Image (cartoon, helix red, strand yellow):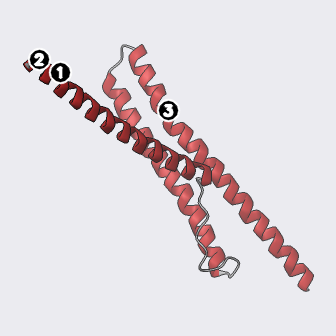
Amino acid sequence: MGKEKEIVYEKFMDLQQQVHQRNQKKIKVGLKVNILLPLVFLVISFITDRSKLVFLVLWIVSLFGIAFYLLYVEYMDFELQEQLKELGIMEKEAEAQALIGEEVIQSIDEINNAKNEMVKDIKDLRKEIKTDIQSMGDKLKR
């Protein structure tokens, strides 16, 4: 009987992992659609002579639809993980697994670091320009 429970447990964990991976794929597809669909509406609005208002409304509605879809997928995955915690399959203290993945979080950190470096570079350039302007002003005064 113990062997059967172990087999059922393994199958259940495999199923949960498959659902989680499918949800990750759904999120990736949803993010791609979130980028491509507005671009399609933008291109169509400039190609055709139709009212731009119609495409603007379609664009806004599509963004809301995609956002609700992404929220739904994330919520269903979160609920699945909460049910696993209630059943004692996952540790209660364990954090829910993210659907987006570590590479996206790492990319966001890299973007923030690059932004901070750019801000520093811009500040340095502003200081150099100010000193150059002051030195030019001093030369002109002489």
The residue mark sitting in front, 2 or 3, is 2
User: Which sits in the foreground, 108 or 39?
Assistant: 108
Say which mark, if any, is on residue 140.
Answer: 2
Residue name at image x 44 percent, y 39 percent: 62
Of residues 141 and 97, the one nearer the viewer is: 141
Q: What element carries label 2?
A: helix
Q: Kindly report the distance in space between the C-alpha atoms of the residues bearing marks 3 and 1.
A: 52 Å
Which of marks 3 and 2 precedes in the sequence?
Answer: 3
- Neighbour class for label 1 at 10 Å: few (<14), some, many (≥20)? few
Q: Quadrant of residue 85?
A: bottom right
Quarter assignment of residue 60: top left
State the count of labels: 3
Q: Identify the residue under disc 3.
A: 37
Q: Which of marks 3 and 1 is nearer the N terminus?
A: 3
Q: Horizontal placement of 120 versus 97: left or right?
A: left
- Farthest residue to the front: give it: 142
Residue type, label 3:
Leu
Measured along the vertical axis of the image, is residue 96 above or below residue 126? below
Residue 101 shows up from this direction:
no
Mark 2: give few (<14), some (14-19) or many (20+) Cα within 10 Å: few
* Amino acid marked by disc 2: Leu
Q: Which residue is drawn at 53% across and 62% down?
A: 75
Q: In the rendered structure, are the residues bearing label 2 and label 1 in contact, judged by CB atoms less than 8 Å apart?
A: yes
Secondary structure of residue under mark 1: helix
Residue 113, image x, y percentages:
46, 46
What type is the residue that disc 1 sits on?
Met
The location of residue 72, given as percent across then percent down, is 52, 56
Q: Where is residue 52 in the image (x, y as percent from the top left)?
A: 33, 23
**What residue lies at 52% left-to-right and 51% top-to-bottom?**
70
* Residue, disc 1: 136
